Image (cartoon, helix red, strand yellow):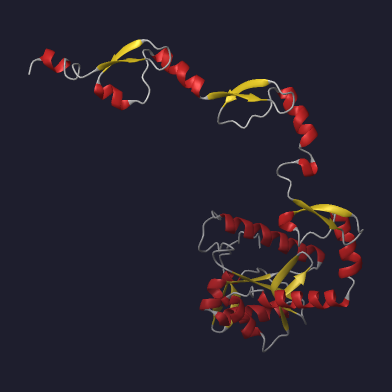
Amino acid sequence: MLYKEVLNIGIKNGKMIKCDYCGADIYRTEYRLGLNKHQFCTPECSTKYRAKESREIRICILCGKGFECVKHKRQRYCSKKCGDTGMGLNNRGKNHPNFNSVEKQCACCNNTFLAVKAKEHSAKYCSRKCQRTYLKNELYSSSEWSKMRSMIAANYISNIKSKETKPHRIISEALSDEYVLTNEKNFKYYSVDIFLEEFNAPIEIQGDFWHCNPIKYSCAKYTQQQKAIRRDRAKNTYLREYHNMNILYLWETDVNSDLHKCKLLVDAYVVSNGNLPNYNSFNYSVCDGTLSLNDVIINSYQGT
């Protein structure tokens, strides 16, 4: 097939039609006619036609003047001035098209107020002030509320998970036969894991990871460890300055591997009235049943 024959394919089955915008005669093949619903002689005619078809004339609902706007818009006013006036006059309170509130009576001051229909049954007060006044005078002072608060508090306490770790429980059970102790003794801003009541002796059970055992970690590189170290330092300083107490630190590795050494260290701590050359269990060892301080002292990150 020759090139000229290729160019002439479809030309013979075309026809003359009118431009849908300006009415000029144009020639279109059957293929071109099937592609588009409207036919135009130039791109300019196409643009003008689509602009004309997408707009319409409406009547301003305030002043009655006609104005042109896009069909898909919800415009009802001819200008911003008419729009501001109309919205201000007609779209307030119950006249607003989206108004769905209901009138209710305040349980405190008995004044009427508007409540959203979705909260028709739950809205009881016209303001926060009325709500606080009603609850203070009517509800919180009643015996039923006192009983309810007691039940809520008891339920909350029963659902609190114990803060005692496994090493904590091991030391607590090992010392309970010889000493009167309290777990999680509170000292205003802080609490200690174990407190020997008769000797005013606070004991902390230190997890190797969370409190950064210097034997296992060369530095406190984790955020959890850094926060725990700062908290431990603050607690140690507070008890030493305001309660004249030095905290004994029993580390997780020593509790799990040498419980006997930990018990001997607690006994020495009690006998010395809380005054030891060092307060970290990893700096002590047991030889022939005797507790002794190591020759090489390792400083903890807590500064003890």
Q: Position of residue 295 (x, y in %)?
A: 56, 67
Q: Quadrant of the C terminus?
A: bottom right
Q: Quadrant of residue 96?
A: top right
Q: Position of residue 62 (x, y in %)?
A: 74, 27
Viewer can see residue 273: no
Residue 26 shown left or right of residue 10 in the figure: right
Image mark count: 0
Residue 34 shown left or right of residue 176 in the figure: left
Q: Position of residue 286 (x, y in %)?
A: 55, 79
> 167 and 51: which one is in front?
51
> 147 and 155: which one is in front?
147
> 64 and 90: which one is in front?
64
Q: Is residue 86 above or below residue 50?
A: below
Q: Is residue 138 above or below residue 106?
A: below
> 201 and 39: which one is in front?
39
* Residue found farthest to the left: 1
- Which residue appears at 87% of the width and 77% of the height? 143
Q: Is residue 280 above or below residue 199?
A: above
Residue 98 shown left or right of residue 132 in the figure: left
- Which residue appears at 46% of the width and 18% of the height? 49
Q: Quadrant of the N terminus?
A: top left
Q: Position of residue 154 (x, y in %)?
A: 74, 78
Q: Quadrant of residue 206?
A: bottom right
- Which residue appears at 79% of the width and 43% of the height? 93
- Which residue appears at 60% of the width and 55% of the height? 226
* Residue found farthest to the top: 24
Q: Quadrant of residue 265?
A: bottom right
Viewer can see residue 260: yes
